[in-house]
């Protein structure tokens, strides 16, 4: 290991990550030795962010390890936190994140260097396993675990001996459980399902489940059920390799076996849903598996009385309840109680869920609580109620509501009734509020008047690309004159700006009138990114009416990503079901697991359900 006096021997300016060069790393490490506790905590936070930025290590991470190891021993007030940083760096899982859009600076070589540096200083860190502070002992166990596979034979026996001593004699059950996990990595874990300590039994069940995979044996499920409802993970339950805590790993394991996971979640919720463990587990099952929404919603409703922060749970309910063809009365009645009796914040979340459950009582409540997201949900779920919702939308738009885009978009499902809001939509375009949404709406419901077409024509000269193209297409839809749209699209698509997909998807109404744009569309069809090629393929189909170029491109893009789903929907709209896609379509339609990231935490709204639906539709075409 290396002392702070040697920090200037490293050429930090040549090392870096997405945040830039590493000149600040030595300054931050020096702060760890000071007496200013707040400054040291901030320095540690910055070191985490710099050396493990967004899940990627930097080229400075390896050279920092010997200095961090020295700080772990000589800055004792922060020993556990520095050890955790070392464990996270060396145990990070490069595959845990989605594929990056651009190459990571933290390369495989940098990661190998980092782990080699930690292995080199490991002998000097071993005394931390006997530290009087339980948090330090737990952090040290994780640091050793991060490089357990690299420990040389001459050191291995000493490490195992010390860890076995912790497992046998440590007064803290959580430390014993951690020691068991580390012994397992050395292939020396004893059978511990019958341990008198629940934390140890739980760790043993976790290890056995990781080895066996789902479905899990009944004896393991029984341990999770009995010992997992209120385990003493402690505030020092630091991450293991892969930057997941033991609680997170157990939740992920149980979510992998939906029957076991929901059974365990039900017992944890019945036991009081301590720290929301049961309801969180149920939610993870819904995110991972198809057709479990009804069971998850029942459990979520049962967990509501136990939580001190119901808003998060109600958001989950609001998300999944839309998937049910007919939400049951018990669920809807429970949501209605919260929507009418809870505090304002909770009531609003409950009302959102009640609207998504298509409960008729929700409409009257929305009219008395006209938040934009509630109005939008009500318009989607009660499109027949335009005569009641449109006046509300008009009042809010006229009052200058800041959420004008959501309010204008809420008009789309309301049919002919939405035309009454034309004056307010025109005013939004005139004043530049929610201009893109206003222009799109005017293309559908607007009138060919000098005022409206003049405003749209002015918008095509905007400084921003998207308002220009949307207004240009809306102008064409009202006038039938393609000149302004063609000029606007020629300028925008030939400028080399980013995200041409967002402009291409608005071309459909122009159809063959957009034929002069074909050279640009064909260029993007061959040389754009995935989303751009998908948009260009759709545009080519709309312009030419021929599937010859578009269908092969869409077929090549079809997969379980958002772009791939859009490609499948485009194929379905075109009435084309390529035979070569059928094996994949059958797997998309029949998989019990979700193939797209469906959850309240993602941007996609029930994307996996759409994937299954469109796959079945394409297969039915034969």
Image (cartoon, rainbow, N blue to C red):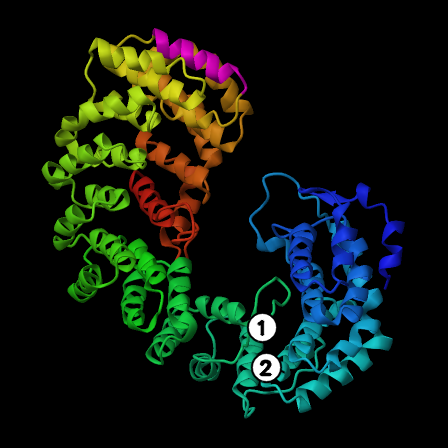
Is residue 237 one of those drawn in magenta? no
- The residue positioned 55% from the left and 87% from the top of the image is 193
The circle drawn on residue 237 is 1
* For residue 365, side relative to residue 199 (left or right): left
* Labels 2 and 1 touching (C-beta < 8 A): yes
Q: Residue 418: horizontal and vertical position, in percent?
A: 16, 30
For the N terminus, the quadrant is: bottom right
Q: Residue shown at 39%/10% (left/top)?
A: 486
Q: Is residue 367 above or below residue 404?
A: below
- Per the rendered image, the range of residues in magenta is 483-496
- Label disc, if present, on residue 174 of the rendered structure: 2
Residue 236 in the image: x percent, y percent?
Answer: 59, 73
Residue 618 lies, in percent from the top left, at: 33, 40
> Is residue 80 shown to the viewer in this render?
yes
Work out whether residue 450 or residue 199 is closer to the camera in this orientation and state it.
450
- Provide the secondary structure element on which disc 2 rests: helix
Secondary structure state at the residue bearing disc 1 = loop
Of residues 218 and 246, the one drawn nearer to the viewer in this rendering = 246
**Quadrant in which residue 610 is drawn:** top left
Residue 307 higher or lower than 376, as above or below: below
């Amino acid at each position: 290991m290396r002392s702070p006096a040697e920090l200037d021997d490293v050429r930090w300016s040549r090392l870096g990550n997405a945040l830039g060069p590493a000149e600040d790393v030595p300054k931050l490490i020096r702060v760890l030795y000071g007496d200013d506790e707040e400054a040291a905590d901030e320095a540690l936070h910055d070191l985490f962010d710099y050396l493990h930025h967004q899940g990627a290590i930097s080229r400075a991470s390896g050279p920092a390890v010997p200095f961090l190891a020295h700080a772990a021993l000589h800055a004792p007030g922060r020993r556990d936190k520095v050890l955790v940083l070392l464990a996270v760096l060396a145990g990070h899982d490069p595959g845990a994140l989605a594929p990056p859009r651009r190459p990571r600076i933290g390369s495989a070589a940098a990661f190998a260097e980092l782990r080699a540096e930690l292995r080199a200083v490991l002998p000097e860190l071993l005394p931390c396993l006997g530290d009087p502070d339980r948090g330090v002992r737990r952090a040290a166990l994780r640091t050793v675990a991060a490089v357990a596979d690299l420990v040389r034979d001459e050191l291995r026996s000493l490490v195992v001996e010390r860890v076995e001593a912790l497992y046998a004699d440590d007064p803290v059950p959580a430390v014993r459980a951690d020691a068991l996990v580390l012994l397992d990595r050395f292939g020396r874990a004893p059978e511990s399902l019958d341990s008198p300590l629940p934390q140890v039994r739980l760790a043993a069940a976790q290890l056995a489940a990781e080895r066996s995979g789902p479905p899990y044996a009944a004896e393991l499920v029984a341990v999770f059920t009995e010992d997992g409802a209120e385990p003493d993970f402690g505030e020092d339950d630091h991450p293991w390799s892969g930057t997941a805590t033991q609680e997170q790993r157990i939740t992920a394991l149980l979510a992998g076996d939906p029957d076991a996971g929901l059974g365990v979640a039900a017992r944890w919720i019945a036991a009081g849903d301590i720290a929301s463990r049961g309801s969180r587990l149920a939610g993870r099952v819904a995110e991972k598996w198809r057709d479990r929404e009804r069971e998850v919603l029942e459990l979520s409703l049962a967990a509501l009385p136990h939580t001190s922060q119901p808003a998060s749970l109600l958001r989950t309910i609001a998300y999944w309840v839309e998937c049910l063809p007919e939400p049951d009365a018990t669920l809807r009645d429970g949501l209605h109680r919260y929507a009418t009796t809870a505090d304002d914040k909770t009531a609003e979340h409950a009302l959102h869920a009640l609207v998504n459950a298509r409960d008729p009582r929700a409409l009257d409540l929305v009219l008395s609580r006209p938040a934009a997201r509630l109005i939008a949900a009500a318009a989607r779920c009660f499109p027949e109620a335009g005569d009641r919702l449109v006046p509300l939308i008009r009042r809010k738009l006229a009052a200058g509501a800041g959420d004008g885009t959501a309010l204008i978009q809420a008009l789309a499902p309301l049919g002919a009734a939405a035309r009454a809001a034309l004056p307010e939509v025109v005013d939004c375009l005139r004043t530049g509020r929610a201009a893109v949404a206003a222009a799109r709406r005017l293309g559908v419901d607007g009138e060919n008047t000098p005022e409206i077409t003049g405003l749209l024509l002015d918008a095509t000269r905007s400084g921003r690309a998207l308002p220009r193209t949307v207004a240009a297409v809306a102008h064409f839809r009202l006038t039938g004159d393609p000149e302004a749209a063609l000029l606007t699209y020629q300028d925008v698509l030939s400028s080399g700006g980013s995200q041409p997909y967002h402009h291409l998807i608005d071309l459909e109404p122009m159809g063959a009138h957009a034929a002069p744009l074909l050279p640009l569309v064909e260029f993007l069809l061959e040389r754009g990114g995935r989303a751009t090629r998908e948009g260009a393929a759709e545009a080519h189909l709309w312009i030419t009416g021929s599937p010859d170029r578009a269908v092969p491109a869409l077929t090549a893009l079809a997969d379980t990503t958002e772009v791939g789903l859009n490609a499948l929907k485009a194929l379905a709209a075109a009435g084309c079901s390529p035979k070569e896609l059928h094996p994949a379509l059958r797997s998309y339609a029949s998989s019990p697991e979700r193939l797209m990231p469906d959850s309240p935490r993602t941007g996609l709204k029930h994307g996996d359900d759409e994937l299954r639906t469109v796959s079945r539709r394409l297969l039915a075409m034969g």
